[in-house]
Amino acid sequence: MVTECDSVVESLVKAFLDPVTIAWNYQKYVYECTRRCLGDGMGQKEPKLAASFKRWRDGLTTIVSPQTVVDSEGRILVWALPNLPLTANSGSPKILEDGAMSQHELLTYELERSREGDSWRWNRLLFRKEAPGDINGVFNFSPAWFMVGHQGKVSGLKTSPFLTTSAGEAWMSDFLDAGSMISGILRIMHPDQYRMQWEVVLALRRDSRFADVLDVWPSIFQAISVIANRQAPLHRDPKGNYYWYDILVSVGQYTKAHLCLEPLGFQMHNRPGTVVGFSGKGIRHGVAEADGQRFSHAFYLRTDVQQYCGVRAAACMTQEVFRRWVGKTGSEKLVNMARDPFSL
Ligand SMILES: [Fe+2]
């Protein structure tokens, strides 16, 4: 585990030290997004927005090594960590894949059931044509989130039923290493978001309905989606926040699958072991069909739960915050990194 953590931190450092700076001001882009009420990003308003915010370069530039994408004011919009050595192909203890395989066994029923629904997210045409043994589906779960149509009501805050079953408990136990790794990655990518999510967890733990499940919930994130063998058209995830990262992790048995970050003009080879942090609400994105079995895991926090808990919203992550945080030497640096970077 220590070796894997070292590799991940090395990749994060490389990404920070290799930024691509685009000409836009993201705050102005967010203003336009808000003004235009883009919803899930699949409507007719997107082309006009794209015309107002030209990409930094024509066509799509492919990210092949750890990089950050930064706006004109130093806001870090994307952390791209391709091919982290956390899968079977890397020869290391394949932390991420162990979690996925656990799901493979435990979540089959739930994933199969998830085919119901009229959103594009469950559209059968977007799932891979099945081969024997394939699992297709989408499964979202959380220790505490609002049921549809019950946002803000105490009685509407519920634990996903799966997590209260013995299968759910086993999954949470099996996913502990992978979940901890992703939580640690967020701690470095966006320490203020980590602080916010930690405060959300503490607030939810004060509610006796959620204390037990949060004791074993394997992530600082408040919700996880497991997406099995589905491509995604360009879209936005409207329940998130423009300044917080969702983290996407891809694992499985495949060699090709592209993640497109459309407004920025970037794409990534989304190979097994790829981890990406960006706002799914702010950056319209999509994933092409893979050439094999691909599990995508999305880790995220919903704004309505943060507001319900009365926790201060995290600000946008910038290069300056990061430099203040780690820009010391020796023991001073370690002391700084243990602190809330926004207090420095
Ligand atoms: Fe998404």
Image: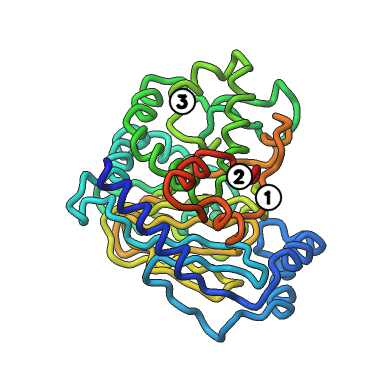
Sequence-earlier tag: 1 or 2: 2
Q: Which residue in the structure is indicated by mark 3?
A: 163
Instruction: Tell me whether circle 3 and circle 1 mark residues in contact (CB < 8 Å).
Output: no
x and y percentages locating residue 230 in the rendered image: 43, 56
Tell me the distance, in whole angstroms, between the alpha carbons under discs 3 and 2. Answer: 28 Å
Quadrant of residue 151 within the rendered picture:
top right
Q: Which residue in the structure is indicated by mark 2?
A: 192
Q: Nearer the viewer, mark 3 or mark 2?
A: 2
Report the amino acid beneath label 3. Answer: Leu
Query: As rendered, which of 322 and 254 lies closer to the eye?
Result: 322
x and y percentages locating residue 272 in the rendered image: 31, 57
Numbered tag placed on residue 315 in the rendering? 1
Tell me the distance, in whole angstroms, between the alpha carbons under discs 1 and 2. Answer: 7 Å
Q: For the residue labelled by badge 2, is the local secondary structure a helix, a strand or a loop?
A: helix
Q: Is residue 124 above or below residue 216?
A: below
Q: For the residue labelled by badge 3, is the local secondary structure a helix, a strand or a loop?
A: helix
Report the amino acid beneath label 1. Answer: Ala
Mark 2 crowdedness (10 Å alpha carbons): few <14, some 14-19, many ≥20: many
Quadrant that contains the N terminus:
top left
Residue at 53 percent of width and 32 percent of height = 142
Report the amino acid beneath label 2. Answer: Asp
Mark 3 crowdedness (10 Å alpha carbons): few <14, some 14-19, many ≥20: some
Sequence-earlier tag: 3 or 2: 3
Residue 129 appears left or right of 206: left
Query: As rendered, which of 305 and 42 lies closer to the eye?
Result: 305
Sequence-earlier tag: 3 or 1: 3
Mark 1 crowdedness (10 Å alpha carbons): few <14, some 14-19, many ≥20: some
Q: For the residue labelled by badge 1, is the local secondary structure a helix, a strand or a loop?
A: loop
